[in-house]
Amino acid sequence: MKRFFLVLLVFSSLIACSPIALINNRVSPRNFIGTRNVAYGSLERQKLDVYQPRKGANLPVLIFVHGGSWRNGSKEIYPFFGERFALEGYVTLIINYRLAPETPFPGFIEDAALAVKWAKDNVQNFAGDPNRVFLAGHSAGAHIVAMLALNPAYLKAVNLERSAVRAVVGMAGPYDIAGFFPQSPALQQVFGTDPSAWAATQPINFVDGTNPPMLLQHGMRDTTVDYRQSIELQQKILEKGGKVELKTYPKLEHEELIGAVSLAAEASLDPSVVPDIVDFLKRH
């Protein structure tokens, strides 16, 4: 039953009786101050939800970027993430972004950069400290936040330096997958059909040792994104003298890693996932 519950976690958000609905039904508005559908840009998908702790001022800020193969997903799936980190004392922003194939690479990364800019300019209105902005992402979202951390061009496009982000958490991220593009029409819809342009879509190709500190988390039973993606990115960053930590979870699959953030599921999955994130963020 546990396996059934979690395998469908990300993919069944539109079904009223889905496992994700069961998780989010356990979310209590008493645990945060919620503000939905705040515009960080002018387009329909450029909106975010704010999960603000009930107490405190000048609080650290955590921006979460959802997964979904760059083609699916929504901030509406992740109230459990917002609740969990609001309880940890973070003003948590969960963003939507434009999806492929209507908006292919790099539109979704540009949206995430714009959300960082919005946070720097506005999060103080939600008790947040604009000088303590962190990023986290799961799956495709981990790819997106890694690109912001490793390729300075996207933040520079919104007049920010990489130092605007204190640290980054990548959960089950694909960081070097261009080798799969020739056999995947779906990935070509996301990243284009020109092989000469594919290298520029992969975070690992921008490692230069000057990235914000990064925490890479990966379940070792992940059959969607091989955990070696995180190992190889860690090795490349270390080779260049950058700051990176790696945490692996022997019993967790792809969806289970993000499911372990939920108050409702963390005890049955792996109760160390959230403490690992919080410990890392507090040290940066």
Image (cartoon, helix red, strand yellow):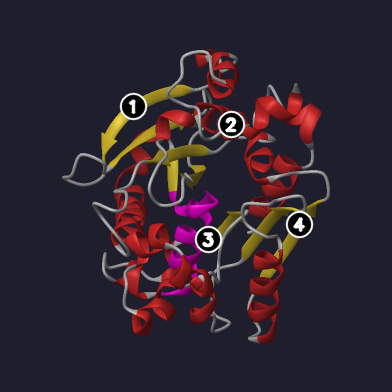
Task: Give the total number of marks visible in the rendering.
Answer: 4
* Location of residue 172 by image quarter: bottom right
Front label number (4 vs 2): 2
Q: Which tag, 3 or 1, sits closer to the chain's start?
A: 1
Circle 2 sits in a helix, a strand or a loop, which is it? loop
Tell whether position 92 is magenta: no
Cα–Cα span, label 4 and label 3: 19 Å
x then y, percent, for residue 260? 70, 35
Cα–Cα span, label 4 and label 1: 32 Å
Q: Nearer the viewer, residue 38 or 55?
A: 38
**The N terminus lies in which quarter of the figure?**
top right
The local crowd at label 1, few if under 14, some if 14 to 19, many if 20 or more residues have their Cα within 10 Å, is some
Cα–Cα span, label 3 and label 2: 29 Å
**The C terminus lies in which quarter of the figure?**
bottom right
The residue at which mark 1 appears reads as: 36
The local crowd at label 3, few if under 14, some if 14 to 19, many if 20 or more residues have their Cα within 10 Å, is many
Q: Which mark is residue 166?
A: 3
> Image check: 153 left or right of 222?
left
Cα–Cα span, label 2 and label 1: 22 Å
Q: Which tag, 2 or 1, sits closer to the chain's start?
A: 2
The residue at which mark 2 appears reads as: 9
Question: Which kind of residue does numbered mark 1 sit on?
Answer: Arg
